[in-house]
Image (cartoon, helix red, strand yellow):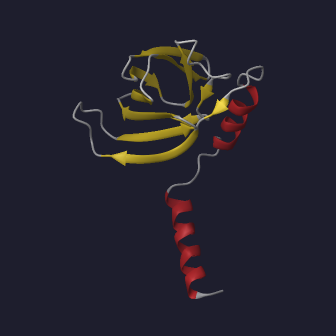
Amino acid sequence: MSERDALLGDIAAMWREADPMPADLVDKVLVAIGGDNLDVEYELLHLVERSRELEGVRGLGDAYTVVFSSGPYSLLLRVGTHAAGRRRVDGWLSPPQSMTVKVTQQADTRYADADETGRFEFEWLPAGLSRFWLAFTDSAAEPDHPFATPAFEL
């Protein structure tokens, strides 16, 4: 083993100890993938970027952005942390257009309308495994199948 490999092994061990993967994460993801809309054929938006931001001007505490994309469509989400495990989600669709955005969580589904600029918001959502769906309001522009993000932790 080279000195570099030993150093990388030590770094990996440090992160496993400092920030371990939640014990139930694999089970949650498998359940979400296995039982979610088996009768619907949809196109999965791929995670392009996830980044942390400084505290927001609205006082939301820690915030991060997540970007998903597939073909011509992109979805940018800014997730801010409220107290008591709540999240505020501000989103933008590209190309900008009116759409209905649906969020599915374990036993809950919520909807928001994106305006003609592609902007939408969920004032608060509970923390937890979530999936965002894009539903086109203009049937002429609608593709053959809906778009959805993979399930991810808010």
Q: Is residue 118 above or below residue 45?
A: above
Q: x, y (%) of residue 65?
A: 41, 40
Q: Which of 86 and 38 is in front in this view?
A: 38
- Where is residue 105, by image quadrant? top right
Q: Which of 147 and 30 is in front in this view?
A: 147
Q: x, y (%) of residue 83?
A: 35, 29
Left or right: residue 3 compared with residue 32:
left
Left or right: residue 84 compared with residue 129:
left
Q: In this view, does 64 lie above or below 88?
A: below
- Identify which residue is drawn at 59% across, 50% down: 21
- Identify which residue is drawn at 61% across, 87% down: 2
Q: x, y (%) of residue 56?
A: 26, 37
Q: Nearer the viewer, residue 31 or 51?
A: 51
How many numbered circles does the render carry? 0
Q: In this view, does 82 lie above or below 108?
A: below
Q: x, y (%) of residue 87?
A: 41, 28
- Toward the front, the furthest residue is 140
- Identify which residue is drawn at 36% across, 33% down: 80
Q: Nearer the viewer, residue 107 or 34?
A: 34
The quarter in which the N terminus is drawn is bottom right
Left or right: residue 12 compared with residue 52:
right
- Toward the bottom, the furthest residue is 2
- Where is residue 94, by image quadrant? top left
- Identify which residue is drawn at 43% across, 33% down: 77
